[in-house]
Amino acid sequence: MSAAMPGRAPPKKREWSWRSGAFRGLVYQVLAVLVIGLALWFLVNNTLENMRARGIQSGFGFLTQPAGFDIGEGLIPYDALDPYWNAFLVGILNTLRVAIVGIVMATILGTLLGVGRFSRNAILRGLCYGYVELFRNIPVLLQLLVWYLVFTEILPPIAEPISVAGLFYLSKAGFSFPVPVWGLGQGLSAIGAVIGLAIAWGYRRWAQRQFELTGNARSLFLVPVAIVIGAALLGWILGGAPTAWSIPEPGGFVMEGGASATPEFLGVLLGLVFYTSAFIAEVVRAGIQSVSHGQVEAAGSLGLSRGQSMRLVILPQALRVIIPPMTSQYLNLTKNSSLAVAIGYPDVVSIANTSLNQTGRAVECIAIIMLVYLTTSLSTAAFMNWYNKRSAIKER
Amino acid sequence: MVKTTLKALCGGLVAAAALGVAPAHAGKTLDAIKSRGSVICGVNTGLAGFSQADDKGNWTGLDVDICRAIAAAVLGDGNKVKWVPLTAQQRFTALQSGEVDILSRNTTWTLSRDASLGMHFAGVTYYDGQGFMVPTKMKVKSAKQLKGATVCVQSGTTTEKNLTDYSRANGLNLKPVVFEKQEAATGAYFSGRCAAFTTDASGLASIRNKEAKDPKEHIILPELISKEPLGPAVRRGDDEWFAIAKWVVFGLVEAEEYGITQANVDKMMNESQDPVVMRITGKSEDTGKLLGLDKDWMVKAIKTVGNYGEIFERNVGPKTPLNLPRGTNELWNKGGLMYAPPVR
């Protein structure tokens, strides 16, 4: 009955024999999955068996036990009596902090350097070239150690710091700077900035549409920036315009007040930024060179200035070439941040090391480190892939 | 062609898996050592007085001598030791995985290590406590004055936890800066990054003496903030080997108590009529047989490194650069804690 249904081709006959390519393919795939599964099972089972045989306790139960050790710096409040997972969280956030700040700074510096390679000024061009060759050819661990040495050996002790206007201090304890005392005014100001961002985004869309419709060019940069700043200011004034600042003051062992970046954080950050930006500069240079020269000439004949043609014509096209290798630079920077243990920055590896030694759960702690880096790397890659798709040529 | 290769590959993997699944049993460490002809000993990568290699690769130190004594008792030669320098983090994994036969690396005996790391501590060879070192010019007299100070510390030790406990108990708000390698931690301290450096008091003496430009520029504060009984450890699951390690350590202490030294051990063996000495030297009872060793196991050990007191004096005692007083490490009948159960 069903076979007689009109308008439908008879179903393809499956051939269950070795002669069928599809069948062979299926068998190979099932076999491959089986082998991988067996290998994994073997590894896990053998490890567990051996650990049991030697009386080594295992499991992730320790994560809810109190950690019992202090952490030098962190973004969230942490107490030594908090459980291990909280200590890990502090470490993960420290890793992310250095990675995110590092990525932003390395991108800015790297882009400037890459563009600088095309400068008409021979000295600037040479400097950029020299920078790239110097920093990408020195191992990153060495650079970290050098920066850390600069902070701890060369800078004055905390009792007699280098001071700028009595507001900024540079010493062996790191870089201290004043911060506003957090209050209602700052809170409203932050809310204002967020609202301002939304308005600015709406304005940009509207302005772009107006430009496409009427040809009237409106500023796409200055006005949105003014909107954000204005909204933030408005929030600040509404909150009573507080002007209280917490200003650092050198104490006996510590800087009282203000906020500080420790030499460990700065060492890791600068090491990673200077190293990675050299690679990013090369990626940017290659991207720019991949845009055909005709584009520059076309932009020139439209009357665009050199800066405009770089910003509006060349960089958007170069981006398509730049983004994929840039992604791997970002991933490298994040992963290289694990070298921070060498100079005492409490990143996730450092916390895991300490936990490993307090609890003896080697397999578990290493697994956590792997999971953290895998997750951050995959998320970074996913984001960059999305951005890559967005900036790819839209073929209509 | 492809098919056969694949089949062979799968077959091989399955076979390998089937063979490997059987749990690796503890094995007879002693047999392995005898057939190998050497004891594999995990030591510190470099801690003056405890384990340190000179420019010719000769290891010296208190922890090192314990391994030599065991090698001498088992193989009759204190030089038949393969040294494996280990960082604080590597040490337990190295012992668990069977990479070393014995871990003699200034390791603190604690409950959690004993109960959950698959190891047994074979006694205490040095009673230590954690202390602080600060630059003399800071004019700090007590650890309680270190309020808010940054403290350099090496990771992978009980030190971090002690530091936190002490900081909490005294409301000091100490900030640890944790380094993976000891050299990095001490380097940061000597550069002035940290107001203080903390580790076991013996370690402080060793570091001050070895790494400071002028040892007088640094003082060790009087407070000891923890108990750190240091001793050798063996892997679980081989009671025979555990007993050997334990009794060589006890034997060295017992030898000191009965006045048997490196110099007089032969004479004592042949002439002494003291029943205890005769037992230790294997002249009367064959204590070695009970452990699976030669009759003169202790004689060989003492000939190689001397008794416990001699080991102490040679490596860390008042005549050495470390200049550590005997203190709690004195024999029990002289006011210390060193007490060995009877060798009989």
Image (cartoon, coloured by chain):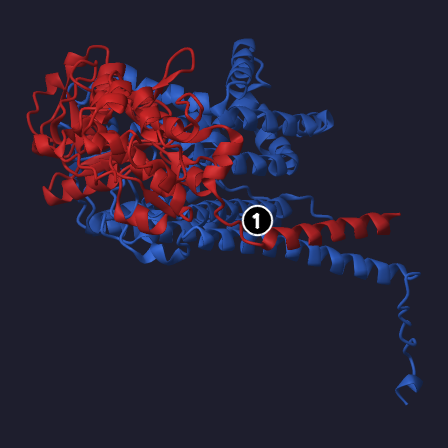
Chain colours: A blue, B red
- Expressed as whole percent of the image width and height from the top left, the position of residue B299 reads 32, 25
Position of A373 relative to A263 (above/below): below
Residue B280 spot, x, y in % from top left: 27, 32
Q: In screen coordinates, is A264 left or right of B140?
A: right
Residue at the spot x=89%, y=59% of the render? Answer: A21
State the quadrant of the N terminus of chain A: bottom right
Between A78 and A16, which is closer to the camera in this rendering? A16
Write the residue at 37% across / 35% down.
B103
Q: Secondary structure at mark 1?
A: helix
- Residue A178: tell me if it is visible: no
Name the residue beneath numbered marker 1.
Answer: A382
Residue B13 visible in the picture: yes
Query: In terms of depth relative to the viewer, which is nearer, B311 or A289?
Result: B311
Could you tell me how many numbered marks the image carries? 1
Q: Nearer the viewer, residue A116 or B161?
A: B161
Q: Give the side of residue B149 with respect to residue A34, left or right.
A: left
